[in-house]
């Protein structure tokens, strides 16, 4: 049973992420403003993380310099606030299935950004380098397919709609995801959101070198993003009714995304990476797409198109190509390092043998 735990945990992680997308979509379709939602979500995460960070890491944390403070603030603005706000708009314009499918492009986008910033190498004359390029092309093809290809529609006739739980006046909500123009806008907004998220993943590694306490680092970014998303939300939404939560789907979505996703999955992902490594965690990402496709059709009544399915498959294919290439490259680097060490050891032995004095009895 112990050996099966990582597999069960990654399935749970992807179920949690699928639930996040579904609840967000239901809340938005029920009339909730996406910018207000993102603020409440980050505020809930901050309320959870700040006490934990103060209790576990505050005493041993290094002093926070002004430069590091500014870097954290800008990183939170780019990778959290703007990424989540843009993702919210994309989710309104499109569907939960598309957002779950587009998430599979994140590792590929992150790799491209790392190459552009010269943090990763792309060797085109090697098999892993060619595989990475193929993965990128699959990813681009998947995004284009999601945006421009519709095809036959698939709809489950029996479903339990979540919208009435989120807002009683569903008829006042302007559902814009059905038109072609807004669908295309939503696809590229989702791509932009993933790009901001990719920058966050690439750049935070450099900041954590100067400020290593991870929990406190996460809590501070959550605090910064709460302030940023509040400023954005209050500037774009002045209707007091949009800020009311009540005991409904809005409150459930905020609590789930802010506490369960930001709190529980943070610990679970750290545990899985420690046990199996980051590649193993990334390989489980497509599970979220499969879960989302099924439950969005059942509970949200979404129509799944053949184009969305094919686009999702292309994105998953691109993800696996890049992950395979990355793991293959790591194995080759490890082998070359071992050979280099053995070569240096043999050269050192030859030098010692050559320079050792001859002993006569």
Image (cartoon, grey):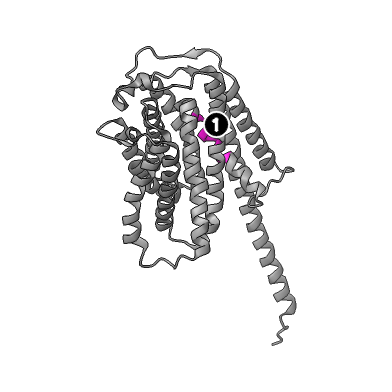
**Residue at point 49% right, 54% down?**
73
* Total marks placed: 1
Image location (x, y in percent) of residue 99: 48, 30
Q: Position of residue 302 (x, y in %)?
A: 42, 19
Where's the C terminus, which quadrant? bottom right
The picture quadrant where one finds residue 30 is top left
In depth, the one of 278 and 208 nearer the eye is 208
Tell me the crowding category of disc 1: few under 14, some 14 to 19, or many 20 or more residues within 10 angstroms, Cα based: many
Magenta stretch: includes residue 102: yes
Asked if residue 154 is positioned above or below residue 358 in the image, the reply reads above
Q: Residue at x 59, y 39 (%)?
A: 108
Q: Is residue 212 left or right of residue 131?
A: left
Camera sees residue 50? yes
The residues colored magenta run 99-108
Q: Is residue 304 magenta?
A: no
Q: Position of residue 337 (x, y in %)?
A: 64, 57
Mark 1 element type? helix
- Residue under label 1, please give it: 316
Q: Residue 236 location, x and y as percent?
A: 45, 37
């Amino acid at each position: 049973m112990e050996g099966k735990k990582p597999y069960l945990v990654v399935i749970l992680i992807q179920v949690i992420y699928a639930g996040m997308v579904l609840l967000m979509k239901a809340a938005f379709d029920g009339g909730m403003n996406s910018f207000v939602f993102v603020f409440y979500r980050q505020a809930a995460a901050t309320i959870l993380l700040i006490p934990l960070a103060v209790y576990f890491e505050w005493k041993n944390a290094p002093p926070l310099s002004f430069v590091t403070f500014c870097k954290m603030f800008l990183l939170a603005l780019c990778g959290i606030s703007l990424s989540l706000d843009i993702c919210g708009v994309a989710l309104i314009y499109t569907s939960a299935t598309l957002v779950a499918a587009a998430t599979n492009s994140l590792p590929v986008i992150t790799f491209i950004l790392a190459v552009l910033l010269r943090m990763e190498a792309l060797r085109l004359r090697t098999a892993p380098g060619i595989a990475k390029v193929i993965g990128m092309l699959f990813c681009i093809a998947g995004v284009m397919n999601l945006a421009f290809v519709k095809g036959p529609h698939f709809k489950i006739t029996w479903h339990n709609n979540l919208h009435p739980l989120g807002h009683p006046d569903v008829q006042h909500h302007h559902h814009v995801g059905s038109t072609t123009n807004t669908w295309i806008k939503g696809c590229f907004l989702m791509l932009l959101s993933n790009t901001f998220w990719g920058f966050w993943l690439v750049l935070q590694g450099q900041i954590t070198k100067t400020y290593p306490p991870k929990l406190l680092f996460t809590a501070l970014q959550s605090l910064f993003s709460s302030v940023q998303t509040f400023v954005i939300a209050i500037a774009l939404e002045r209707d007091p009714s949009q800020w009311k939560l009540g005991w409904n789907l809005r409150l459930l979505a905020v609590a789930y995304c802010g506490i369960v996703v930001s709190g529980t999955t943070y610990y679970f992902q750290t545990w899985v990476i420690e046990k199996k490594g980051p590649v193993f965690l990334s390989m489980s990402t497509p599970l979220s797409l499969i879960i989302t496709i099924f439950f969005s059709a059942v509970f949200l009544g979404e129509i799944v198109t053949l184009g969305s399915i094919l686009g999702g498959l292309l994105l998953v294919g691109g993800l696996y190509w890049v992950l395979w290439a990355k793991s293959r490259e790591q194995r080759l680097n490890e082998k070359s390092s071992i050979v280099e060490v053995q070569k240096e050891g043999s050269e050192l032995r030859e030098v010692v043998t050559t320079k050792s004095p001859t002993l006569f009895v």
